[in-house]
Amino acid sequence: MASVMMEPPSSQVALLHRISNIVTSDLSLDEMLGEIVGLTVQVTQCDACLVYLLERDLGEIVLRASQVPHAADLGQIRLKMGEGVTGWVAEHKAVVVLSSNASLDPRFKRMKALVEDTYQAFASVPLLSKGEVLGVVNVHHRDQHQYTADEVAMLTFTGEQMGSAIAKEFLEDENERLVSEKEDLKRQLETRKLVERAKGLIQARHNLTEEEAYLRLRNESRRLRRPMRELAEAIILAENLSRKTEASMNSEPRP
């Protein structure tokens, strides 16, 4: 999918316009994160940008996008809430700016896979939506860099605006997951009903116990390499056809 075209923002209004283009475009979450990286690089002229997202169920911040290639590390580099500067920013929902010797900050945690952790300057802002943290954007400069008030304001503004966009994507993904789970549950219940009915037919036909009928159905499924549902449907269909044939024969006038 084509990337959203952007020019270097000169104000918050221009920046909001660029963000609006991203939000209203038909981008997946990963593509949107890539656009956040590109936008942040243009705003700060940084040497590296990393985007982390919160996995709330695990309480971890996970690397999801970067300017410098980290294909093998995306989804693998994780920090606990409060761990490292990134975890601290996520936990406190606050900005951290380190203009030089970033690695000397007591909160700093060096990640061997990240060359960015050897850079001198580092700024970190939370991705927020309605006061809830969704992730963190980290900006790195190889050399010392005095972050201006305007740069910090732009980063904060970007974090707030993109946080809302990401929250929307999260909500849509969650809705899709719930719909999928509902459909899976429905299929499971339907399969269970079919298996129970087929099992009852086998019991009656062969004078078996419930357990014996189930074992016969399961073993036949394995022997034929057919799903239990498919085999159950075949048994029920055969029974229905048999009953219809018998009913038809019984309804025919006798000579």
Image (cartoon, rainbow, N blue to C red):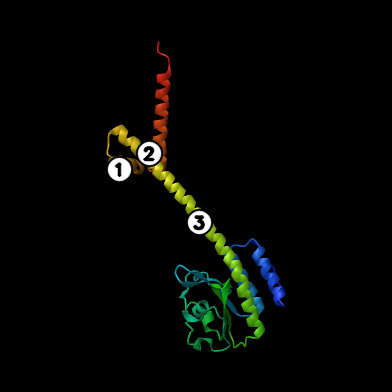
Q: Which residue is label 3 attached to?
A: 178
Image depth: mark 1 or mark 2 in front: 2
Q: Earlier in the sequence, mark 1 or mark 2?
A: 2
> What is the distance, in whole Å, between disc 1 and disc 2 at their CAs?
14 Å
CA neighbours of label 2 inside 10 A, class few (<14), some (14 to 19), many (20+):
some
Mark 1 touches mark 2? (CB < 8 Å):
no
Question: Residue 30, how many percent across, how many down?
Answer: 57, 65
Q: In the figure, 219 relative to 136: above or below? A: above
Instruction: Give the farthest residue toward the top.
Output: 255
Mark 3 neighbour class, 10 Å CA radius: few under 14, some 14 to 19, many 20 or more: few
- Residue at 66% x, 62% y: name it: 25
Q: Position of residue 99 (x, y in %)?
A: 58, 88
13 sits left or right of 164 in the view: right
Which amino acid does the dot numbered 2 rest on?
A: Arg
Frontmost of labels 1 and 3 is 3
Q: Quadrant of residue 203?
A: top left
| Image location (x, y in percent) of residue 158 | 63, 74
Q: What amino acid type is highlighted by mark number 1?
A: Leu
**Quick one: 205 or 234, which is closer to the camera?**
205
Find residue 135 and report its horizontal and vertical position in percent: 54, 73
Q: Which residue is mark 1?
A: 215
Which residue carries the number 2 mark?
Answer: 197
Tell me the element at label 3.
helix
**Given the image, on which type of amino acid does mark 3 rest?**
Leu
> For the residue carrying disc 1, how many other residues have a C-alpha within 10 Å: few (<14), some (14-19), or many (20+)?
few
